[in-house]
Amino acid sequence: MRGPGMGSVEINDARGPAAFDQLMRLEQESTEIFQVQPSFLPGFVQVEGYAAAVIGEITRPAPVDTELTEKVGVRMQRARAFESRLKGETPPRMWAVIDEAVVRRVVGSPAVMREQLAHLIALSRLKTLTLAIIPFDRGVHPGMAGPFEVHQVAEGQAAVFFECTNGDEIVGTDQELVRHYRETAESMLASAVTGDEATALLESISGSLSS
């Protein structure tokens, strides 16, 4: 499905590696992005130590596994490319909605987590990125059903990406479904802390981590 102003990106439905490949292309042309993550930080904001711990625990590699190194390398390349977009001349507008549990869970080690939180604070100060943290006291929220992200590429053209343990999936043909997930993400923003409140929460958590 191709529309005016979409450049080289064609939005199709896909599963598995093809879905992720399309996501990486969308990341370079999306004008608006909503990311919802209840379990761990989105890949684009992860530092290397955090990424290695997350990927390592999920994939459970052998003691000597070059695949882990390759996967971490790909994630870091993706993160650097996306950060360059956020700081570039035509950055996307992005909203990252995460659960408080995500930033409180120590991933890797306290030192890794402090580095990760510092990086997250720095990114959250970019004018193009809104970091939204849903506090524990807000109770159950729709994002707890699982992670997803919505990419708006051009007027009327968008896709929703689902990261799943049994295979990633991207949907672009069902625009009603895409709108549903965008509206879900937008509704969650009302329950979240952002701006200075989010920064203060991250700094407090970082300061409480043991050496």
Image (cartoon, rainbow, N blue to C red):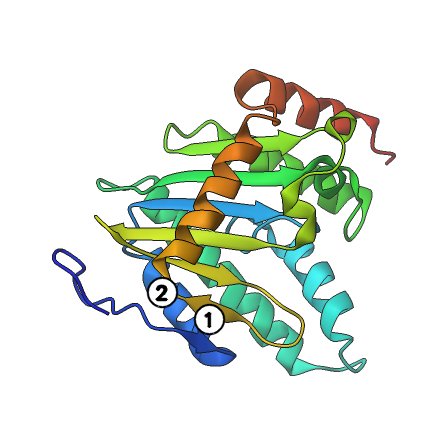
12 or 79, nearer to the observer: 12
Would residue 89 be found to the left or right of residue 123 on screen? left
Q: Quadrant of the C terminus?
A: top right
**Which disc is residue 172 wearing?**
2
Q: Dot 1, crowdedness within 10 Å: few (<14), some or many (≥20)?
A: some
Residue at x-position 25% and y-position 69%: 10
Residue at x-position 55% and y-position 25%: 190
Residue 136: quarter of image: top right
**Looking at the picture, which amino acid does disc 1 mark?**
Phe
Q: Quadrant of the N terminus?
A: bottom left
Q: Is residue 25 above or below residue 46?
A: below
Would residue 98 be found to the left or right of residue 180 on screen? right
Kindly report the distance in space between the C-alpha atoms of the residues bearing marks 2 and 1. 13 Å
SS type, badge 1: helix
Q: Is residue 55 visible?
A: yes
Residue at x-position 57% and y-position 75%: 70
* Residue 112 in picture, x, y percent from top left: 73, 46
Residue 200: quarter of image: top right
99 or 208, nearer to the observer: 99
* Residue 94 in picture, x, y percent from top left: 41, 40
Residue at x-position 68% and y-position 28%: 202
Kindly identify which residue carries mark 1. Answer: 20
**Count of numbered badges drawn on the protein:** 2
